Image (cartoon, grey):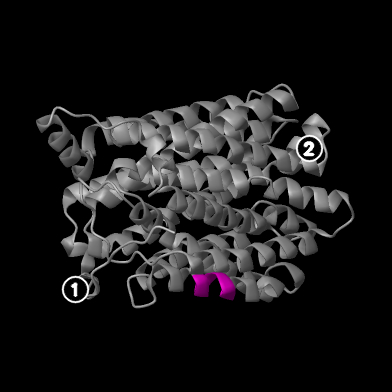
C-alpha cells in the first residue's frame, strides 16, 4: 500500500483554529460554491427518483427488482463519467469538465420525464449517471486545490454535505410540489423529473465567477517551461507506485456507497409501508447528514485523523440500525433517522479530502474520480439486491438492516488498513502517491 509522508509538526501547525472562515479568500469561496451547488443539484436529480418508484412501477408494470435497477444503472454509468471527467480534468483543467458534466446530467434528467417505456427510462437514467460521475470527479479537486491544506477536512465535509442537501431539497419538492402537478395519471412523476433541467443554469455562474485550480495551473506553467506535456493521467493509476492506492481506494469506496445506498434508496418506500409521511423523517435524516458530514470532516483534522473519524462514525451508525428500520414508534423512528444521517451518511465527510490526498497532482482528478466511481459501480447493485431480497421473501427492514450492517463492518476494516493522510500539502510537481 502506497504510504503518504506527513510531517507531524506541520500537521499540528495546520489544524484550523479560531474563525477558520476568515482564512478563506473570495476566490476560494467561489470555487467551493460552484462545485457545491453542482453536487447538491446532482443529488437532487438522483434522489427525486426514489420518491417516484411506486408510480413508475404502476406506469410500466415492473416489479421491485426492476425499479431498483433504475438506481443501479445510474450508479454503474457513474463509473464512465467519473473516469472520463477526471482524466479530462487532469489534462485540460477542472472547470471545463465540471461544466460539461452539469449540462449533461441536467439534459438527461429532463429527458427522463418523457419516457414512453421502461426501456427508455432505463436508458435515460444510465446516461444521467455519466454526468453525475463527472461532477464529483472534476468539482472536488477544483475546490480542494483552492483551499488551504489546514482547512481541507472542513471543506471536504461541507462539500460532501451538498449531496444530502440535494436529497433534502428533493424531499421538500416532492412533499409540496408533487400534489400540485399530479392531476392526471403519469404526470406527477414526469414533472418531478422535468425539474432536473434547472441545474444547467449553474454553468453560467461557474463560467463567470469560478477560477481554475491554482495547483493545476502551476503544473501547466512548469510543463510549458520545459516544453513537456503530461500523458493521459488514467494510465498513471496503474503504474507500480500508484496501483495499490487505486485498488484500495476503489474497493473502499465500493463499501462506502454500498452502505449509503442500503440506507437511503428504499427508505422512502419503507416509510410508506409504515404509513408515515416521508418528509419529517427525510428532513431528520438529511439535516443529520449535513451536520454529520461537516462535523466528521472537522473531526478528521484532530488527532483521530481521516481514518479514525470515519471508522467511529460508521460503527455508531451500525449501532443505530434498530431505531432506523425496526421500530414502529414515531419518535424513535425520527431519532433513528437523525442519527443514521449524522453517522451513516456523515462518514462521507472525510471522502473528498482523503481521496484527493491519496493521489499525486498529475493524476489527482483521475484517481479520485476513478476510485469514487468504480466504488459507485461496485456498490451499484445495492438497490437491486434489496429489491431482490424482498422478491425472495425477506421483509424490507430486514433486507436493509443486513446490507447496512455488513457493509459498515467491511468499510471500517478497509479504512483501517489504509494510510493516514491528514496534513498532506499538495505540490504541483509531485508524481508519486
Nearest-to-viewer mark from 1 and 2: 1
**Separation of marks 1 and 2 at Cα, in angstroms:** 55 Å
Q: In the rendered image of this protein, does residue 91 appear above or below residue 406? A: above
**Residue 25 visible somewhere in the drawing:** yes
Where does label 1 land, which residue? Answer: 13
Q: Crowdedness of circle 2 by 10 Å Cα count: few (<14), some, many (20+)?
A: some
**Who's the residue at 13% across and 37% down the image?**
222
Query: Which comes sooner in the sequence, label 1 or label 2?
Result: 1
Quick one: SS at disc 1?
Answer: helix
Answer with left or right where residue 185 lies relative to residue 432.
right
Where does label 2 land, which residue? Answer: 57
Residue 238 is situated, as x and y percent measured from the top left of the image, at: 44, 41
Q: Which residue lies furthest to the right in this view?
A: 393
- Main secondary structure of the magenta stretch: helix
Q: In the rendered image of this protein, does residue 137 appear above or below residue 296? A: above
**Who's the residue at 25% across and 74% down the image?**
8
- Quarter of the image for residue 358 reads bottom left
Report the quarter where the N terminus lies.
Answer: bottom left
Q: In the rendered image of this protein, does residue 127 appear above or below residue 312? A: above
Residue range highlighted in magenta: 311-316
Magenta region includes residue 148: no
Amino acid at each position: 500500500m502506497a504510504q503518504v509522508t506527513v510531517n507531524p509538526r506541520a500537521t499540528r501547525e495546520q489544524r484550523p483554529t479560531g474563525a477558520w472562515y476568515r482564512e478563506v479568500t473570495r476566490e476560494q469561496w467561489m470555487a467551493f460554491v460552484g462545485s457545491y451547488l453542482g453536487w447538491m443539484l446532482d443529488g437532487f436529480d438522483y434522489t427525486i427518483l426514489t420518491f417516484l418508484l411506486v408510480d413508475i412501477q404502476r406506469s410500466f408494470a415492473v416489479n421491485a427488482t426492476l425499479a431498483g435497477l433504475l438506481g443501479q444503472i445510474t450508479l454503474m454509468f457513474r463509473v464512465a463519467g467519473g473516469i472520463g471527467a477526471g482524466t479530462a480534468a487532469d489534462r485540460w483543467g477542472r472547470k471545463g469538465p465540471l461544466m460539461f458534466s452539469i449540462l449533461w446530467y441536467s439534459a438527461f434528467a429532463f429527458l427522463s420525464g418523457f419516457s414512453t417505456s421502461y426501456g427508455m427510462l432505463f436508458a435515460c437514467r444510465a446516461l444521467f449517471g455519466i454526468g453525475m460521475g463527472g461532477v464529483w470527479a472534476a468539482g472536488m479537486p477544483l475546490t480542494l486545490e483552492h483551499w488551504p491544506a489546514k482547512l481541507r477536512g472542513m471543506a471536504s465535509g461541507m462539500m460532501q454535505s451538498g449531496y444530502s442537501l440535494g436529497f433534502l431539497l428533493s424531499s421538500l419538492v416532492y412533499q409540496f410540489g408533487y400534489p400540485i402537478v399530479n392531476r392526471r395519471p403519469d404526470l406527477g412523476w414526469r414533472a418531478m423529473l422535468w425539474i432536473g433541467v434547472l441545474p444547467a443554469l449553474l454553468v453560467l455562474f461557474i463560467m463567470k465567477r469560478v477560477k481554475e485550480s491554482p495547483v493545476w495551473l502551476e503544473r501547466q506553467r512548469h510543463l510549458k517551461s520545459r516544453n513537456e506535456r503530461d500523458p493521459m493521467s488514467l494510465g498513471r493509476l496503474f503504474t507500480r507506485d500508484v496501483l495499490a492506492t487505486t485498488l484500495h481506494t476503489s474497493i473502499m469506496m465500493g463499501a462506502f456507497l454500498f452502505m449509503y445506498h442500503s440506507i437511503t434508496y428504499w427508505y422512502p418506500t419503507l416509510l410508506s409501508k409504515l404509513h408515515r409521511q416521508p418528509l419529517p423523517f427525510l428532513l431528520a435524516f438529511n439535516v443529520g447528514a449535513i451536520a454529520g458530514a461537516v462535523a466528521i470532516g472537522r473531526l478528521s483534522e484532530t488527532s483521530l485523523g481521516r481514518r479514525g473519524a470515519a471508522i467511529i462514525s460508521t460503527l455508531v451508525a451500525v449501532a443505530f440500525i434498530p431505531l432506523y428500520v425496526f421500530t414502529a414508534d414515531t419518535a424513535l423512528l425520527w431519532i433513528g433517522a437523525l442519527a443514521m444521517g449524522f453517522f451513516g451518511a456523515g462518514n462521507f465527510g472525510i471522502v473528498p479530502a482523503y481521496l484527493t490526498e491519496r493521489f499525486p497532482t498529475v493524476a489527482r482528478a483521475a484517481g479520485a474520480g476513478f476510485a469514487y466511481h468504480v466504488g459507485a459501480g461496485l456498490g451499484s447493485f445495492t438497490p437491486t439486491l434489496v429489491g431482490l431480497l424482498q422478491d425472495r421473501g425477506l421483509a424490507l427492514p430486514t433486507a436493509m438492516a443486513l446490507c447496512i450492517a455488513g457493509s459498515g463492518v467491511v468499510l471500517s476494516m478497509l479504512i483501517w488498513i489504509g494510510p493516514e493522510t491528514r496534513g498532506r500539502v499538495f505540490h504541483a510537481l509531485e508524481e508519486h502517491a
